[in-house]
Amino acid sequence: KAGVTQTPRYLIKTRGQQVTLSCSPISGHRSVSWYQQTPGQGLQFLFEYFSETQRNKGNFPGRFSGRQFSNSRSEMNVSTLELGDSALYLCASSLALGKYEQYFGPGTRLTVT
Amino acid sequence: TQLLEQSPQFLSIQEGENLTVYCNSSSVFSSLQWYRQEPGEGPVLLVTVVTGGEVKKLKRLTFQFGDARKDSSLHITAAQTGDTGLYLCAGPGNDYKLSFGAGTTVTVRA
């Protein structure tokens, strides 16, 4: 079975721009979660999607948003980028809501200049 | 938010030595997971512990869940250079969000 894939793997953007990251979960996994990982804050939960609906959200500003499609693929969007948004963005899939075992993709390294 | 504290923050040992990393909280967790993350990659799930007092073994790795389900430990016997990585514990909070500890960076020297 193919693992979680994320595109792109690396991205460089300028302050004020917006960015969209993409995630394809493991086949059969219906829940997709997004995390931000930085050296200072560690791994922080952004949001979780299941059946195309956001089921849970972390403590991030409204500039961070996401969506899930009917095939369980997910995208996250960050608008009006700030320098502090530079991070590794990780997508993880799990079988269903309430199944906390996360299967992570390789991440997208976002650098904001 | 239920916090998970991991210790030590860094650990450097020689190949063949044993090591233990800890994951502690003041809150009770219904389950805890352990992940290993290598540079440039996403975390990989190692194990889930669910029952208080549970011990799980994965080859040279032994995971233990505390009786009160507030803490967990990971013990590696005869460490190898391939065990190098960031070890993360994680558990679901009352808000159903998964919280991660800050991690223990383990370096195994050849």
Image (cartoon, coloured by chain):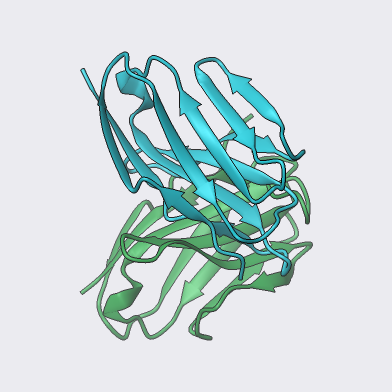
**Residue B46 occupies which quadrant of the picture?**
top right
Front residue of this view, candidates B66 and B56: B66
Is residue B98 rendered to the left or right of residue B7? right
Q: Between residue A13 and residue B10, name the one nearer to us.
A: B10
Q: How many marks?
A: 0
Residue A55: x and y, percent? Answer: 74, 70
Q: Nearer the viewer, residue B96 or A105?
A: B96
Q: Quadrant of residue B80?
A: top left
Q: Provide the letter of the chain coloured green.
A: A
Give me the residue at 65% from left, 45% from top: B32
Quarter of the image that includes the N terminus of chain A: top right
Which quadrant of the structure image shows residue B64?
top right
Q: Position of residue B73 (x, y in %)?
A: 54, 37
Identity of the residue drawn at 48% across and 84% down: A63
* Left or right placement of residue B76 versus residue B56 in this view: left
Q: Colour of chain B?
A: cyan
Q: Position of residue B91 (x, y in %)?
A: 63, 53
B79 lies left or right of A27: left
Residue depicted at x 34% and y 63%: A87
User: Height in image: B79 above or below B86?
Assistant: above
Instruction: Answer left or right for B64 relative to B102.
Output: right
Residue A45 visible in the current orientation: yes
Q: Where is B109 relative to A76, above or below? A: above
Residue A11 higher or lower than A2, as above or below: below
Vertical arrangement, residue B42 with respect to residue A19, above or below: above
Residue occupying image coordinates x 75% and y 49%: A99
Locate the C terminus of chain A by quadrant.
Answer: bottom left
Q: Position of residue A75 (x, y in %)?
A: 56, 64
Q: Is residue A73 visible?
A: no
